[in-house]
Image (cartoon, grey):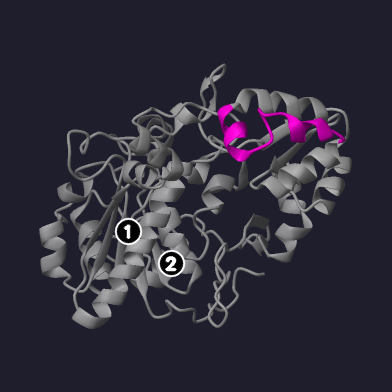
Amino acid sequence: MTAQAPAPRGPLGGMRVIDLGRIVAGPFCAMMLGDFGADVIKIETPPDGDFLRHQAPKFADDVGSYFATANRNKRSVMLDLRSPEGLAALRRLLAEADVLVENFRPGVLEKMGLDEATLQREFPRLVVARVAAYGHVGPMKDEPGVDQLVQGISGHMAITGTVETGPIRSGIAICDILGALCATMGVLAALVERAASGRGQIVRTSLLEAMLGMMSMQAGKYFATGVDPKPEGNHHPVIAPYGAFETSDGYVQLQVMHERQFVALAKACGRPEWLDDPRMNTNPARAANMPYVRETVARAIATRSTAEWLRDLHAADIGCGPILSVAEAFRSAQALATEMVQHMHLNDGTEVTIPGFPVKLSRTPAALHRPPPRLGEHTAEVLGSADAPGAARPGKREKGGRT
């Protein structure tokens, strides 16, 4: 798809979003709104703009690959938010906007004179999404934070890995992404409510709240028993055998949820004696003897290749799958069939490959209509003139760094 493709009218067509986000959480939220048709104006501060623009590896001089995964379907406007003119220009944009997304360090928005009371008074229809690290109240509310710190504080790292490895972080910025998803959900709910009341509101979330809210069965396990969950590695915390097992040439994951499946597994493994073993022949017994069950099944799985196990386990109607690399995952027939690989071209012709849309709407689907923008690419287009009050261009870094 070319950079000049016309924007389709998605379900959020006609909505304007002002994106003050930086790094991942804020920009990812705004990008999802843009995917569904909102006109997203990404405000960037000179001289460098969003930090991720310049993070290697890069697609182009000011379009890093990390940046590209959170900033498609946006227009980039350079505004010096440290100047009265820049702030005045931002206010003019907010007066015509439906949504503001921000994930500044605590207090930055307030220093701009855009505290929550002012925003609600001056822009009563505006939905304001505020994404913090730890929350907007409480003893940590003013502390800056990043994804990995929140992974640790949320309890996530304590249950990831094994007893031997110690705490392990997630391989993706899971707190940032979940924070973005929660912010997006809040924005959409607030827009629906605004249709009835005519009034915007403040949507607050944080990386920590998103992670704590998604702790799911591990939180339930703790609340039910009072026992702190421990890391289980690649195995299910309460069901066995359910997890990753090493084969003769790789790994296979399998899940045995029911007695019928365990009978089928014993047959596929050529181990009929398992059905007479009181430590394995019922779900409660397997749950009570997890280490023994895992070790016993692991010895059987190690005797054959991944391909052989996948063939036989599928035939036995046992849930199973391989462990793919990132490259293999995006090259897989399933990823391609679900259009989870998308291609766009920057204005200089550079092809950009990015993940596709995880949510499909039947009548008004998400669409690619703008590539990740160059820094300040749309300043004149949005403000009317490159010399409009508040407009800025990339240049020499000023003392004090970025806002």
Side of 98 where 23 appears, left or right:
right
Q: Residue at x 71, y 23 (%)?
A: 295
Question: Magenta segment range?
Answer: 270-288
Side of 249 where 34 appears, left or right:
left
The quarter of the picture where residue 402 lies is top left
Q: Secondary structure at mark 1?
A: strand
Side of 167 where 65 appears, left or right:
right
Q: Are marks 2 and 1 in contact (CB under 8 Å)?
A: yes
Residue count near mark 1 (Cα–Cα under 10 Å), binned few <14, some 14–19, many ≥20? many
- On the image, the x and y values in percent for residue 21 come to 36, 52
Q: Which residue is mark 2?
A: 33
Q: Residue at x 57, y 71 (%)?
A: 360
Q: What amino acid is labelled 1 in the image?
A: Val
Q: What amino acid is labelled 2 in the image?
A: Leu
Q: Any mark on residue 101, and which?
A: 1
The quarter of the picture where residue 211 lies is top left
